Structure formats: C-alpha cells, structure tokens
Amino acid sequence: MTDGQGEPTVPHNAFYTVDADFRVLRQERISTRGSMTTTLKEKGEGIMKKISLTLMMLLMAAALSACSPQYDWRDYRSNDAPYAALFPGKPATQTRPVKLDNLDVDMTMTAAEVDGVVFAVGSAQLADAAATPAALEAMKTALVNNIGATVTKAKAASSASTGGKQTVLDVEAKGNRNGEPMVLIGRFIAKDKRIYQVIVMGREKNIVPDTVDTWFSSFKLN
C-alpha cells in the first residue's frame, strides 16, 4: 500500500483496533503486445513441435509469475524499539494512540503487505511492567475479534535472564471476512515494560507456511 508519492503506508488493519478490508500491496500484471508470424514452409515437423513446446513453457511461466506473490525480503532495524526483523517488502511505520484494556499507550506499527497478507510488528512501552500480562491479552483479543476469529492454537512461555523477564504468547486463529476464510498467526511478547505484537494476518489461501516461518524466525529482540 502506498501514498500519493509512491511511498508505502501502514495497512489500516495492521493496527489491531481498526476493522478494514485487506488491500493488496502489489499486483503484478503481464501484458503481451504484438503478434508473431512464423513461416515454416520448409521446416520439419520436429522443429514445429519444439516451437510449440517452447511457447507453451513461456505461457506457463508467464501465468505463474502473474499469480505468484513477490517477496522482497529486507532487513529492518527499528529506531523506536530494540528489535530487528526481515520484512517481505518495503515496510511503512506509523505511531498512534491505542487503548489496551484500561491502558492508553502510543503504539508504533511497522508493516508490509504482500498478496493481501499483512506482516506487522507493533511495539509500545508501558509505565509499569506489572501491566504487561493484561496488555498482551488485550492485543490478542482485539486482533482475534478483528476478523471474527476463533483461537485454534495457543501456547504461553516465560523465561528469565540477565536481560530481564520475558513472556511469549503464540496464537493461531481462524475466522471469516466477507465470505473469505481468514487466518491470524501472532506472537505477543512482553519484556520488562515493553510489549510487542508480531503478526501475519490475511486470506488463508494466500498464506504460505515457509514464508510465515521465515518471518517469525527473523524477529529478534536486541
């Protein structure tokens, strides 16, 4: 999604509070112009078969390239929060106030959209680390409700190190929007006073498991 100057913008539905339809960030179209006339009066049948096979392969390749999403993985290091991730396209960043349960916070969302699927990282800092469990639950609940989904998988884990206590909640949910099956895959993280939501959200048919694995494995807290 881009603005009037061609720069990417954060998809509205990347913010968990906004209920808007997904829009495709980029759609490749292939247009074939002109015509080709080949005269084969003195050519053998074998050459004709080779040409036919070549044309068929070219048409198949064109069809595949027109339908396949274009992933342009690029390293991103946040200036707002201590994390890094690989985005599948040029990301856009936006900060806006949101309400997490009874907490008012400024959330910074960085997101890219490919083939109708949103890849996003949201981060915010709370005034009190004790409020992080409720904030994570509020983020998860709002995102699930955003697509009218039901949680199908959930896993929570906590760890402590010299860098402080860290809580991770992994969630997968499935829902429906405008008659289309939707999927949300989210990782909600709390470390000290900072909270993060790392998500993939979009049409179920457009979500590629290998791409999801690349996305989540690339996210690192500094």
Image (spheres, rainbow, N blue to C red):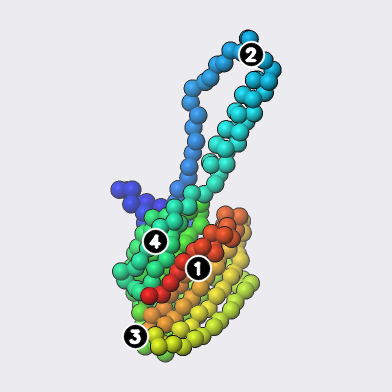
Question: What is the x, y in percent for residue 181?
Answer: 61, 59
Residue at the image point whose x is 57% and y is 57% from the top: 208
C-alpha separation, residue under disc 2 versus residue under disc 1 = 56 Å
Quadrant, the C terminus: bottom left
Residue at the image point whose x is 57% and y is 60% from the top: 210
Q: Is residue 53 left or right of residue 81?
A: right
Q: Earlier in the sequence, mark 4 or mark 2?
A: 2
Tell me the residue that label 1 is attached to. Answer: 217
C-alpha separation, residue under disc 3 versus residue under disc 4 = 30 Å
Residue at the image point whose x is 54% and y is 83% from the top: 157
Kind of residue indicated by mark 4: Asp
Mark 4: secondary structure: strand
Mark 1: secondary structure: helix
Kind of residue indicated by mark 3: Ala
C-alpha separation, residue under disc 4 versus residue under disc 2 = 53 Å
Tell me the residue that label 3 is attached to. Answer: 127
Question: What is the x, y in percent for residue 13?
Answer: 45, 62
Q: Outermost residue toward the bottom?
A: 130
159, above or below 43, in the image = below
